[in-house]
Image: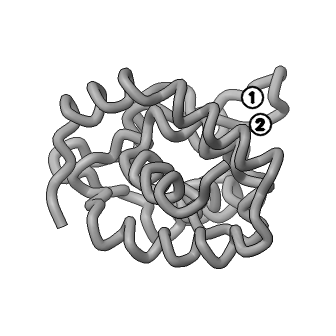
Amino acid sequence: MQAINFNSFKRKVRSRKLSFRRYLGKLERNPPKNLDIIAEQVDKEVWKEVDCLSCANCCKSMTPTFTIKDIKRIASHFEISPKEFKEKWLEYDKKEGDWVNVSMPCQFLNMQNNMCSIYEVRPADCAGFPHLAKKKMKEYIHVHQQNVVFCPATFKMVEKMMLRVKV
């Protein structure tokens, strides 16, 4: 497994972003019957090649959504109330109806080693990211269309899907 070269990743994204998004759109409109099985196989291959800790771009440039359950769990971890947790670290996105980080990069990211300081109690959104092998992949394709520009694992997944599934 190689460390992510982020400059190289950005160049690849610039050159392939539109074709990847178009491909995913076509895949969403016309998925093969075995899409979930293919996605599961590709997921296993991707994680043999991608090291998240050498990247952490998701934590540096995106915010998870925090559910009420996440907020309660993390607040308890800090031994503060959910209200105090929200006031200190979150803001409410009225447009999306979600609780999100107030600042980027994520306040819980250790920038020296790219590790999460609340990994054991992190939001469910973080725990599932980048959602490559979700059951019913068709329902997550719109998420992959967004994440392909942020996440080398998602980018690699789309590369591999393009080789396997012609649309």
Locate residue 10 relative to residue 132 in the image: left or right.
left
The three-letter amino acid code for the residue at tag 2 is Asp
Q: Which mark is residue 98?
A: 2
Given residues 93 and 75, the one toward you in this image is: 93
Does residue 75 appear in this view? no
Residue at the spot x=53%, y=30% of the render? 19
Give residue 123's quadrant in the image: bottom right
Estimate the x, y position of residue 148 in percent, counting from the top left: 50, 39
Judged from the image, the secondary structure of the residue bearing numbered disc 1 is: strand
Residue 101 coordinates in the image, percent (x, y)? 57, 34
Using the image as rendered, state which of residue 142 and residue 67 is in the foreground. Answer: 142
* Towards the viewer: 62 or 84: 62
Q: Contact, CB < 8 Å: mark 1 with mark 2?
A: yes
Q: In this figure, which colouring scheme has been used for the structure?
A: one colour
Above/below status of 53 relative to 1 = above
Quadrant where the N terminus lies? bottom left
Give the left or right position of residue 120, taking residue 93 as reference. Answer: left
Which numbered disc covers residue 48? Answer: none
Disc 1 marks a residue whose amino acid type is Tyr
Which residue is found at the position 80% from the left and 51% from the top?
30
- Which residue carries the number 1 mark? 92
Q: Residue at x 53, y 36 (%)?
A: 20
Task: Measure the alpha-carbon separation of dots 1 and 2.
Answer: 6 Å
Position of residue 24 in the picture relative to residue 151 (left or right): right
Mark 2 crowdedness (10 Å alpha carbons): few <14, some 14-19, many ≥20:
some
Q: Can residue 5 be seen in this snapshot?
A: yes
| Disc 2, SS | strand
Question: Foreground residue, 97 or 50?
Answer: 50
Is the residue 14 above or below the residue 40 in the image?
above
- The 10 Å Cα crowd at callout 1, few under 14, some 14 to 19, many 20 or more, is some
